[in-house]
Image (cartoon, rainbow, N blue to C red):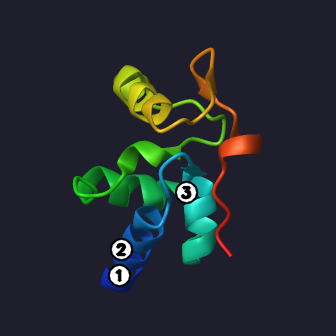
Amino acid sequence: MVTTDEQIERVRELVASIPAGRVATYGDIAAAAGLSTPRTVGWIMRTDAADLPWHRVLGASGRPSAHLAQRQLRLLATEGVPVTDGRVDLRTARHPFD
């Protein structure tokens, strides 16, 4: 499947809209952007997110990727996101996309 420029921009808009102190999952963003899989969001984030609050996007478990975990959790904790045992409490910190 080819990812269009419009889909990339939509994902970027959604990530940019996550306020400090809140998080979203790759799946949340995929659903809001109308994408078929969270993996597409991951690919976009990996290739085009340096200027975005990338640290506010997590996997469905609430855990960050292992290679980013310490940095990501530190940034989130600074914003007041509840982190326990290396996992974000998605029930309280998840940003709703309406």
Quarter where residue 88 is shown: top right
The answer to whether the residue labelled 3 contacts the one labelled 1, judged by CB atoms less than 8 Å apart, is no
Q: As drawn, which residue projects farthest toward the top?
A: 85
- Decide which of 58, 79 is in the foreground and name it: 79
**40 left or right of 59?**
left
* For residue 42, above or below residue 70: below
Residue matched to label 3: 38
Residue 39 spot, x, y in % from top left: 49, 54
Residue 47 spot, x, y in % from top left: 25, 55
Res. 37 mark:
none
Residue matched to label 1: 4
> Residue at 63% of width from left, 57% of height from top?
95
* For residue 5, above or below residue 29: below
Q: As drawn, which residue projects farthest toward the right?
A: 91
> Residue at 43% of width from left, 23% of height from top?
66
Q: Earlier in the sequence, mark 2 or mark 3?
A: 2
Q: CA distance from mark 1 to mark 2?
A: 6 Å
Quarter where residue 10 is shown: bottom left
Q: Amino acid at mark 2?
A: Ile
Q: Secondary structure at mark 3?
A: helix
Residue 91 spot, x, y in % from top left: 77, 43
Res. 8 mark:
2
Q: Secondary structure at mark 2?
A: helix
Q: Amino acid at mark 1?
A: Thr
**58 left or right of 31?**
left
The answer to whether the residue labelled 1 contacts the one labelled 2, judged by CB atoms less than 8 Å apart, is yes
- Decide which of 73, 40 is in the foreground and name it: 73
Q: CA distance from mark 3 to mark 1?
A: 15 Å
Q: Amino acid at mark 3?
A: Pro
